[in-house]
Image: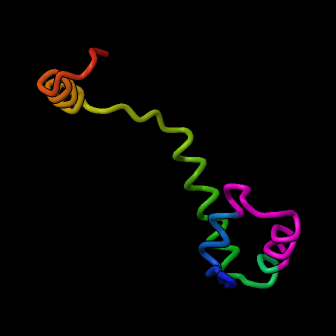
């Protein structure tokens, strides 16, 4: 059975380098002719860059809740 991908699914595969060389070349050609897809690609690149720049840490409240749950569940101490 052949699986068909939407342009957004293809975009995600392309961004995460999950395409074969042939698929990547075809997708790059599609980017050149589809302005909307190109804008989605540029937006996704920008978003990934911002996500990679952010250092995310859980709040103290979250850490305390996790530790409390782990302690009450008898899980190993961290």
The answer to whether 67 appears left or right of 49 in the picture is left
The answer to whether 22 appears left or right of 55 in the picture is right
Dividing the image into 4 quarters, which one contains the N terminus?
bottom right
The relative height of residue 17 versus residue 57 in the rendered view (above or below) is below
- Which residue corresponds to the image point at 79% horizontal and 74% vertical from the top-left? 27
**Residue 56 position in % (x across, y down):** 41, 35
Which SS does the magenta portion mostly show?
Answer: helix
Is residue 46 or residue 11 the one in the foreground? 11
Residue 22 belongs to the span the image colors magenta: yes
Please provide the residue range marked out in magenta.
14-29
**Residue found at the far top of this picture:** 77
**Residue 74 position in % (x across, y down):** 17, 22
The relative height of residue 45 versus residue 31 in the rendered view (above or below) is above
Dividing the image into 4 quarters, which one contains the C terminus?
top left
Q: Quadrant of residue 73?
A: top left
The relative height of residue 57 versus residue 17 in the rendered view (above or below) is above
Residue 72 belongs to the span the image colors magenta: no
**Residue 44 position in % (x across, y down):** 60, 62
The answer to whether 22 appears left or right of 5 in the picture is right
Is residue 31 or residue 3 the one in the foreground? 3
**Residue 36 position in % (x across, y down):** 65, 81
- Which residue corresponds to the image point at 71% horizontal and 63% vertical from the top-left? 14
Q: Quadrant of residue 66?
A: top left
């Amino acid at each position: 059975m052949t699986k068909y991908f939407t342009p957004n699914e293809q975009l995600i595969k392309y961004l995460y380098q999950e395409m074969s060389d042939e698929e990547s070349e075809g997708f790059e050609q599609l980017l050149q002719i589809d302005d909307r897809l190109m804008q989605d690609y540029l937006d996704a690149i920008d978003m990934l860059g911002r996500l990679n720049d952010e250092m995310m840490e859980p709040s103290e409240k979250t850490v305390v809740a996790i530790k409390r749950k782990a302690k009450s569940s008898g899980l190993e101490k961290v």
